Image (spheres, rainbow, N blue to C red):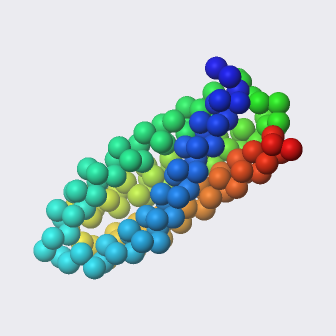
Amino acid sequence: MNPNLLFLLNLLSTWYMVGLIWMVQIVHYNLYDRVGTDAFAHYEAEHNRLITPIVGVPMLIEIITAAALLWATPDFLPKPVVWLGLGLILVIWLSTLALQIPAHQKLLSGFDLASYERLVNSNWIRTASWSARGALLAYYTSTALR
């Protein structure tokens, strides 16, 4: 595959996730404690059902294109930056699997303040990591455009 096209797909999927994670962090998760205890389990189940395709597809595109950039690297992108980007994706995926998914699983039983706080606070790991990836890719996009 064309290295520039791979980079573009990676850039687009990352920036899609940057926007989404900030909306989730600042708006969506911060409204969780306002749903009410009677409706919360259903709300959480619907959240999980509806958000999965919205985050799953771009996350898969992002990780696949980031890995493919190891073999097809554009001239403007240093190989250590590709590895750094993959490292940030690893942090995101590990945080998702080890912290956010277990918190969501606990919340499926109903609102639990400790699980809610763990979800909101630990999600900053993903927010910061995606933001760092976005900034990194934006910088190298600017170098390619010069």
Q: Position of residue 34 (x, y in %)?
A: 28, 79
Between 31 and 41, the one lying in front of the other is: 31
Q: What residue is drawn where x is 47% and y is 72%?
A: 26
List the single residue furthest toward the front.
145
Count of numbered labels shown in the rendering: 0
Between 103 and 25, the one lying in front of the other is: 25
Let me know if residue 69 appears in the view. Answer: no
Q: Please, is residue 104 above or below residue 94 in the view? A: below
Let me know if residue 112 appears in the view. Answer: yes
105 displayed left or right of 137: left
32 displayed left or right of 79: left
Q: Quadrant of the N terminus?
A: top right
Q: What residue is drawn where x is 37% and y is 54%?
A: 101
99 displayed left or right of 9: left
Q: Please, is residue 38 above or below residue 41 in the view? A: below
State which quadrant residue 47 falls in: bottom left
Q: Quadrant of the C terminus?
A: top right
State which quadrant residue 9 falls in: top right
Q: Position of residue 95 (x, y in %)?
A: 50, 54
95 displayed left or right of 30: right
Q: Position of residue 20 (x, y in %)?
A: 48, 57
List the single residue furthest toward the left.
38
List the single residue furthest toward the right.
146
Q: Please, is residue 35 above or below residue 5 in the view? A: below
Q: What residue is drawn where x is 43% and y is 64%?
A: 24
State which quadrant residue 53 falls in: top left
Q: Position of residue 85 (x, y in %)?
A: 67, 44
List the single residue furthest toward the top.
1
Between 77 and 41, the one lying in front of the other is: 77
Q: What residue is drawn where x is 72% and y is 51%?
A: 138
